[in-house]
Amino acid sequence: MRKTAFLAGMICAATMAFAASNTGMTKGKVQLKSAGPLAFGPEGILFIGDSLGSSVIAVDTGDTKAASAGKVEITGINQKVAALLGASADQITINDVKVNPLSKNVYLSVTRGKGEGAVPVILRADASGKITEFSLDNVASSASALPNPPVAKAGARSDPRLETITQVAYSGGKVIVAGLSNEEFSSNLRTIAFPFEKNVTASSIEIYHGSHGRFETQAPVRTFVPYTIDNEPSIVAAYTCTPLVTIPMSDLKPGKKVEGATIAELGAGNRPIDMIAYKKDNHEFILMANSSRGVMKLKSDHLEKYKNITAQTDITGVPYETIGSLTGVKHLTSLDDSNALILTESDLRSVPLP
């Protein structure tokens, strides 16, 4: 039987092995230079992407009490976060939102302030809407440094160092990190065995961008989801101007230049933000939030049937529908099997999966 959307299963399968293994964590203060993409692994382990520090930090949250998902609704989220951190709302940036699959508590990576004085913070919200700071002053943690991070260009219109990490995910005992490096093919996917090992597998990624009509190696993956395609563990990734690409996990080897297969062009002038995979009515779907093209629902039962796009083209490939009821979405993540969690300019709330 073909299995897809294997992330949740892999987390459950890895939990027993994790519990019996040495995590390599030490207790103390975690020093973040930035707080960006988040992901959860087994037993309440939170992974924090620190682009400025060019590292991924694993933190034992101790937040493992199982709970059923309830309705989440926090209105005026920016104002409430600002009040908690003693800042004005325009000085608060919520960089990512993830739900702990065990406790159903919501974790947010936040930046307080702007420029050199900006401070990274991790917050936690419960189902009642209470928001607290998750202190990193005395926690069990470990870190993995990422090789060859891009060189910072302070004051530049786009500082590549800030895109060292664009997304993090955990699957099959590995942390998968998308972002940029300082290599010739700067688009990069790194995989790190967890508990963390010294070796980080870094692969350069090349794709054919149909709407641009050329191969590209400098643009990072903006968002991705681990997925099984035709019985092969893979990654489904989206890039700016919205090519949708599949990459077999087996291709991600040290120093290898990998060519992803572009299976859809979903529209120019758009930046993908987040994507999740789910099942409903005996079908499989990917839901993707975007900067200017709304929230897309893609039917993903048989992604292997779509041919690799190798010529200039407009919107084509995997079909999608736009979910008109979901507007202004800044972040999107899974809450449970039936609900997603969305962050908008005004609130953080759960919504039924379409």
Image (spheres, helix red, strand yellow):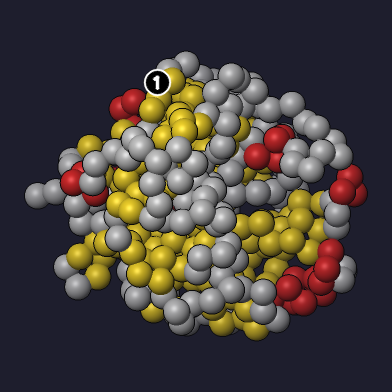
Taking the spot 70% from the left edge, 68% from the top edge, the residue there is 132
Looking at the image, the residue that sits furthest to the top is: 255
Q: Quadrant of residue 310?
A: top left
Question: Is 219 or 47 nearer to us in this picture?
Answer: 219
Question: Is 141 or 74 nearer to us in this picture?
Answer: 74
Q: Please give the residue where the numbered disc 1 appears in the rendered image.
A: 253
Taking the spot 67% from the left edge, 32% from the top edge, the residue there is 54
Going by the image, does 192 lie left or right of 154? left
Looking at the image, the residue that sits furthest to the left is: 1
Question: Is 95 or 298 nearer to us in this picture?
Answer: 298
Q: At label 1, which amino acid type do we have? A: Lys
Circle 1: element type: loop
Which quadrant of the figure contains the C terminus?
bottom left
Query: Would residue 342 be visible to someone looking at this image?
Result: yes
Query: Would residue 67 be visible to someone looking at this image?
Result: no
Taking the spot 59% from the left edge, 49% from the top edge, the residue there is 37
Instruction: Estimate the x, y position of residue 35 in percent, counting from the top left.
Output: 69, 48
